Amino acid sequence: MGESIRKVALFDFDGTLSRRDCLVPFLWRCVGPIEFARAFARSAHFLVPMQRDSFKASLLWQIFHGKRADEVSDLGEKFGRDIVSHRLRPDTLERLQWHLGQGHEVLFVSASLAVYLDTVGRLLDVTTVIAVELESDEDGILTGRMVGGNVRARRKVELVKQYLAGPRVLEGDAAERKSKKPPGPPPDTSPFVEESAVNVEPCEIWAYGNSDGDKQLLEFADHPVWVSRYQNIPTPVIASGAKQPSP
């Protein structure tokens, strides 16, 4: 008998699994309101159409350049625990838990920071976390740069395809699941690169998102679900052409 088709659920995070944005509150915690306001002001000239990624790159550099990676990691651990305790949407969390109960692979695919999403993923027992990684040097000092750029729009699909092209993660392989992340491009690579020619086995894919940065991820899925701010899952506002997921 052949192996059953692979089933994978992809979750955006901010506003999809969390009640609202998590990045700004974390940056605020890292440097405080005054330094955050200064960093925002220094990066504000990028707040024009089509420069969203440049704004984020500048803001993260202002916040993290020269910080100790271990200290930021400790803050991320604490913030991740706070997210799980106080900042998750109950309806979307229930959907995530349903996928886990069905034995599906569950991924976070987010433009938020891995430094706290890794903790959230571990506590929720998800398969892996695809998110923005902060670059550090050999001395453990953050450079302020993102490894491989921002994780949004087409870049989300590219990284999911890299993940799916790797060895299949079987139910029960907990240690392997936690360590299995797609290989990132070198630090100077644009997040809007041409998609790699990767060999992806047949899968049934669910995707959950709530913003323009999730459009390509939703289009990639067999079961795309647009998560409305005002309407709970399991009766969500469905993206155009989407199928209503049924437990």
Image (tube, rainbow, N blue to C red):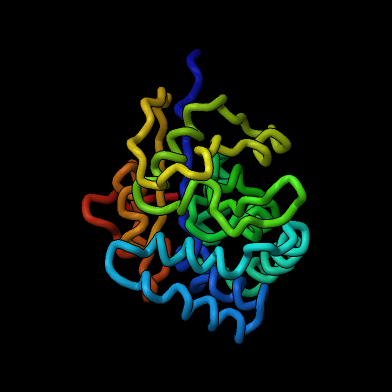
Residue appearing at x 40%, y 26% in the figure:
198
| x then y, percent, for residue 200 | 41, 26
Along the line of sight, the residue nearer the viewer: 77 or 42: 42
| x then y, percent, for residue 104 | 53, 40
Residue appearing at x 53%, y 76% in the figure:
39
Residue appearing at x 73%, y 36% in the figure:
175
Along the line of sight, the residue nearer the viewer: 243 or 185: 185
Residue 218 in view in this figure = yes
Q: Quadrant of residue 93?
A: bottom right
- Residue most toward the top? 1
| x then y, percent, for residue 199 | 41, 23
- Left/right of residue 25 with respect to residue 215 in the rendered view: right
- Left/right of residue 220 with respect to residue 179 in the rendered view: left
Q: Quadrant of residue 22?
A: bottom right
Q: Look at the picture and state if 66 lies above or below 171.
A: below
Residue appearing at x 46%, y 54% in the figure:
150
Q: Look at the picture and state if 114 lies above or below 37.
A: above
- Left/right of residue 239 with respect to residue 202 in the rendered view: left
- Residue most toward the bottom? 34
